[in-house]
Image (cartoon, rainbow, N blue to C red):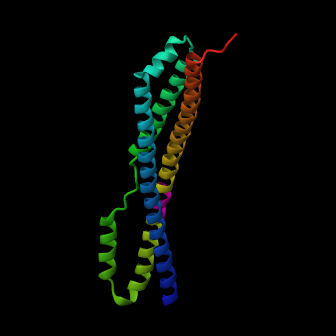
Amino acid sequence: MSEQRIALVKELFTASVSELTNAQNSFNALDTKAQNTTTIAGIFLASTLAFLNSKVFETVINSGKAVSLILLGFVTGFLIISVLCCLRSITIRETPVLKLTNFQKELEGILRQPDDQVADRYENFLKSRISDWITAASELRETNIGKAAKIFWGQIFLTLSIISIAILMIYTLAINYQTINPTRS
């Protein structure tokens, strides 16, 4: 077995380890993104609940307009869905695990071989490890795609709630303005 073959296999091995490391880093980054989105949605949800107890909301209710209640319902619903999507993403923990016991046994078997057989066994060992690393990286990428999709929808619903809040605020300001300064006939 040539040294070039071993060098090529080692290079592929290093690349496969790097690929799994990148997938693991993406997994962790997705968790952080989901936590941040949940935090923002939670702050808006708390603000929505505070709005329910405010005098401004009482004014809107007393005006007899159902639009504000509908908008507030949308805001609350969108925020809850956003939090649930992101929490579901955070709870996805199925990650591939490489079994190091097989790794250790194979390595011990190689080291017991006569020197003239080590090169072939070593190449096969590296190829087997490469396959394991690539499989683990592929499985983790699939998990990351699922996590990212849930976060995406969580962020969509967070955005929808923010837009609904803006509309609700504009509507509430308009109602209050009309209450304070009624138009002349």
Identify the residue at horizontal 58%, vertical 22% (top origin).
177
Is there any visible trace of residue 108 in the rendered image?
yes
- Percent x, y for residue 176? 55, 21
Nearer to me, 184 or 105: 184
Identify the residue at horizontal 59%, vertical 18% (top origin).
181
Q: Quadrant of residue 66?
A: top right
- Percent x, y for residue 21? 43, 65
Q: Is residue 175 above or below residue 9?
A: above
Q: Is residue 177 left or right of residue 81?
A: right
| Magenta-drawn segment | 134-139
Q: Is residue 173 above or below residue 20?
A: above
Nearer to me, 37 or 124: 37
Q: Is residue 114 left or right of residue 21?
A: left
Q: Is residue 94 left or right of residue 61?
A: left
> Is 161 a magenta residue?
no
Is there any visible trace of residue 2 in the rendered image?
no
Q: Main secondary structure of the magenta part?
A: helix
- Percent x, y for residue 105? 30, 71
Q: Is residue 152 above or below residue 64?
A: below
Quadrant of the rendering where the C terminus is positioned: top right
